[in-house]
Amino acid sequence: MGDSHSHASVRHSYDTVAEEYALRLHEELAGKPLDRALLRALLERSEPGTAVADLGCGPGHVAAWLAAQGATAVGIDLSTGMIEAGRRRYRDVDFREGDLLALPAADEEFGAAVALYSVIHLAPGELRTAFTEARRVLRPDGLLLVAFHVGEELRHLDEWWGHEVDVDFHFHEPARIAGLLEEAGFTVEMRMERSPYAHEADTRRAYLLARRAAA
């Protein structure tokens, strides 16, 4: 499914930077108060102890934070290197290697899910498939929190922290993401944008909270 060459490049690129990524970003949420607030709201509105999926989890620091709040956290990522880095650090997270377009999860397995800056590596034509997959693995009324960079830009990296990579970053307009979520069977309940924190890349950030329709 999707552009296999592009996905292979993303996988290889994240494999290449996995260990450094984990070292640099393992405390990332400590400097993101709005993100933490949104994640807490997601958990408060989900069944206590429910399984929560982190879609595109990287080395698992967000999944580990969710687990620390009492959730049964499952981290899913395309990169073997990221999954291995997460397993070494976070024993209380169930890590699974898999693609956002074909998630390694059962129908209605999760009570909630997050996709924080993972859809930025999907081509625009793949987003609807990814959101349909997210709906498949969520229980009726399950919540999905999606975060991404705002705009229509395509950025490419061929070097990252001194490592050779080949990875694209797609920016998205919130209205388009909201429309695709609704087409995939979600009801968008919240939209928020914020400016970057001082330690982040200089991009505007968007967050959409969507609920899976029961029918």
Image (cartoon, rainbow, N blue to C red):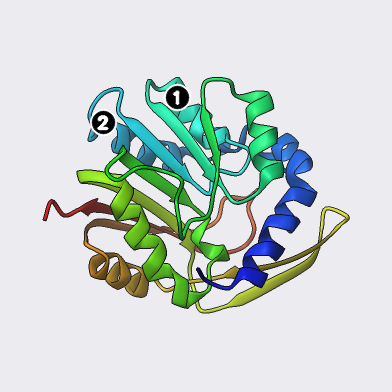
Q: Which residue is mark 1?
A: 67
Q: Which residue is mark 2?
A: 44
Which residue is nearer to you in this view: 106 or 77?
A: 106
Give coordinates of residue 139: x percent, y percent: 23, 43
Q: Is residue 66 left or right of residue 188?
A: right
The amino acid at mark 1 is Ala
Q: Is residue 12 left or right of residue 118?
A: right
Q: Is residue 52 left or right of residue 22?
A: left
Give coordinates of residue 195: x percent, y percent: 50, 58
Which residue is nearer to you in this view: 83 or 182?
A: 83
Q: Residue at x 51, y 64 (%)?
A: 204
If the image is split into quadrants, where does the C terminus sit? bottom left
Which residue is nearer to you in this view: 205 or 213?
A: 213
Q: Is residue 138 left or right of residue 83?
A: left
Distance of mark 2 from mark 1, alpha carbons? Answer: 13 Å
Q: Residue at x 51, y 27 (%)?
A: 93
Look at the picture and state if 168 lies above or below 95.
below
- Local packing at callout 2 (Cα closer than 10 Å; few below 14, some 14-19, many 20+) is few
